[in-house]
Image: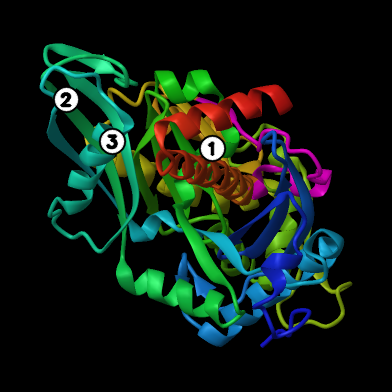
Amino acid sequence: MIKRFMDARSDSASSLSKDKIVAALDIGTSKVCCLIAKVTDDGEMQVVGIGHHASQGLKSGNIVDLKAAENAIGQAVLAAERMAASHLKNQPLQSITVNVPGTHTLSHHVSVDVKIQGHSVTEKDIRAAMAQGRGVEVAGQDHLIHNIPSEFKLDRTTGIHDPIGMNGEMLNARLSLITALTPALNNINTVVGKNHLDIEHYCAAPFASGLSTLVDDEKDLGCTVIDMGGGTTNIGVFVGGKIIFSSAVPAGGQHVTNDIARGLTTSVTDAERIKILYGAATTSLSDDNKMIDVPFVGETDKTHTHQVPRSLLTGIIQPRIEEIFELVRARLEDSGLQQIAGRRVVLTGGASQLPKLDEIGQLILDKKIRLGRPQPVKGLAEATSGPGFSTVTGLLNYAAFHAEEKKSSATQQIFSALPGDLVQKVTQWLKENW
């Protein structure tokens, strides 16, 4: 187990600065990444700690070795804590927001009714609708991690995004529920807990990737985000500004690397290097004339190589890429959301950087594709702002949003507990002094 700063954690919260500290942890098949940020009173977020480590104990999004995964997480978190030590007052993190791979998620859509009886719709009515959603029996449901109102209907008026303040008799809410498999969550909780961290929020990986890479118009008009990682390819569908579908296929960049290692009879490490330097998703006319040096597997002397044409490498890569996109297409067709999801795809993730990948995707999915990277975050280094860090950046945005929401909710609870005249006095004092 990694020893992080100190074992005692009980006094750490009191020693933190006035700014809210949030943290995100992306447990991926190829790497584990941790980001720590401070959120100021005006809602501005700045990254103050970055840590990442080669992933261990994971295969295709599944934890297969608890001890190895625990160690990789500890190394990544420790690196981020050391960088953010002055903001943490040399205390370890207490809680963190963690991703749930799309392979462990299920999407459900339910419709619930709340009687309004002529008065204005309030936040209490919205909470009542969401509470009904949490109580709905869904086949295969394990643990609810997202309960998102996607659309409202008030009497005969449909397509309402925010009904608060509107008058009517009956409010209907369509909710997008995302659940996760309990055994998978238990394993995640175990490896994170072994590092003395509490999980503050779970967030589906496709949701996080969409939060960091999609622009508002894409989320509103309909867009699919495809995050190609090492062991999985996560899929998220956004419509009306909300995520309505989360899933994944158990294949990614590591499968391409393994194919190259077998096809060229070389080590996995050399296959990864060859993929990065010379790989492409489709062939070009000059590939037959370009030769690649391939080290023999098991040879300690790297000068002992054999040469193969680049076209052979591409011929190994292309079938696997086509298979991944065909699996994604099948998953989208099975969801029944092909039409409302639109014809826009944002492709991101570490494995998305393979040249000409978007060309194959456009042909198979019949959608317009752009390559996406996380939107800029203050304090995030250039080396950690590429497509491979889309999920962890989205997790940080998710954590920061909920930190602000929690603070706002706490303020509302304080005010709701005060007598009416006292509320007016406090409000007036705030106006005069702030």
**Residue displayed at 46% across by 53% down:** 203
Q: Which residue is mark 1?
A: 211
Q: Secondary structure at mark 1?
A: helix
Quadrant hosting residue 245: top left
Q: Which residue is mark 2?
A: 171
Find residue 158 and name its label.
Answer: none
**Residue displayed at 17% across by 53% down:** 135
Q: Does the rendering let one see residue 401?
A: yes
Residue type at mark 3: give it: Lys
Q: Secondary structure at mark 3?
A: helix
Residue type at mark 2: give it: Leu
Indicate the quadrant containing the C terminus: top left, top right, bottom left or bottom right: top right
| Mark before the other along the chain sequence, 3 or 1 | 3
User: Observer-nearest residue: 194 or 162?
Assistant: 162
Residue type at mark 1: give it: Leu
**Residue displayed at 61% across by 32% down:** 371
| Mark before the other along the chain sequence, 3 or 2 | 3
**Residue displayed at 58% across by 62% down:** 96
Q: Residues within 10 Å of mark 2 (few under 14, many from 20)?
A: many
Pointers 3 and 2 in contact (CB under 8 A)?
no
